[in-house]
Amino acid sequence: MFETISYQVVDGVAWLRLNRPNKLNAFVAQMNHEVKIAVRNAASDDEVRCIVITGEGRAFCSGQDLSEVDESMDHGQVIKQHYSPMIKQITQCEKPIIAAVNGVAAGAGFSLALACDFRLASEKASFVNAFIHVGLIPDSGNLYFLSKLLGRAKTAELAILGEKISTAQALQLGLVTSVIPMDSWEKEITEFSIKIAQMPTKAIGLIKRYMLFAEELPFDTYLEKEAEGQRIAGLTKDHREGVQAFLEKRKPTFIGK
């Protein structure tokens, strides 16, 4: 079904692996499209309760494949046609998405990781806003995400200097959730993704939705929206299970409904 990525669902987790390891998983238009389709499929699949995006080989994603760039290219149209739809699909997905950053995340690969809800990084991972080194601005939502995570001054530093960020620096800045040793990489990524998949999926989706509302709406309007969101959450089976489990002094078993 896919040529530039691999996709499989195991234990409620959709594993989306960027699969151009000989090119450090650099983006081509087909990969943008396939990531978008895979996330959309996972979002509509009732069996999927969590999504993991990672890379095959030694890189997460090195950004745009520069061998596809030529002087006639309209970079704005490339963003509009290929990158923006992919990033929008990720940010609009109401299922939790984990970026398992196994190696370098550069350029649009950095942006891809930033668009996810969690970033788990291996000891060998690194992050770099490489755009400045080819005379471009960070794209694929990069400055949007970074400015919200780090503020204006640090975002400007990362974007303009374009220096590599180690996992230790990323952890200190709050860019990653945790740093995982390579000898336990697969085990810890799997355990974390299954843990998230076993949580109340509908509530997570509502949290993601209302975080977006919180960025866009006046406070009073947001409070009205919040009440509606809580009404929806209160009608889920997982809410009833959570209350019952609390009363019975046991661990809840959520089903994502």
Image (cartoon, rainbow, N blue to C red):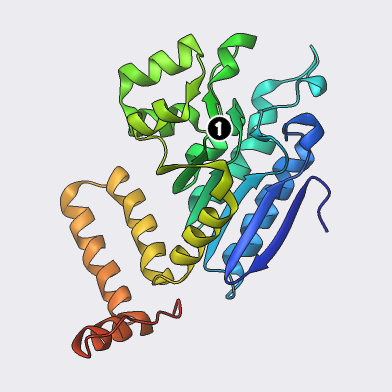
Q: Quadrant of residue 203?
A: bottom left
Relative image position of residue 242 (x, y in whole percent):
29, 81
Mark 1, Cα crowd under 10 Å, few <14 / some 14-19 / many 20+, is many
Q: Residue at x 23, y 54 (%)?
A: 222
Question: Could you say which is closer to the camera, residue 168 or residue 208?
Answer: 168
Q: Residue furthest left?
A: 220
Of residues 203 and 245, the one nearer the viewer is 245
Q: Residue at x 36, y 63 (%)?
A: 206
Indicate the amino acid at tag 1. Answer: Ala
SS at mark 1? Answer: loop
Q: Toward which corner of the image does residue 101 lie, by quadrant?
A: top right
Which image quadrant for residue 105? top right
Whether 45 is drawn above or below 162: the answer is below
Residue 213 in the image: state x and y as whole percent: 32, 51
Viewer-side residue, 192 vs 23: 192
The residue labelled by disc 1 is 125
Q: Is residue 127 left or right of residue 232?
A: right
The residue lying at 62 percent from left, 62 percent from top is 14
Percent coordinates x, y for residue 185 in the rendering: 56, 48
Q: At which x and y percent is residue 171?
A: 38, 33
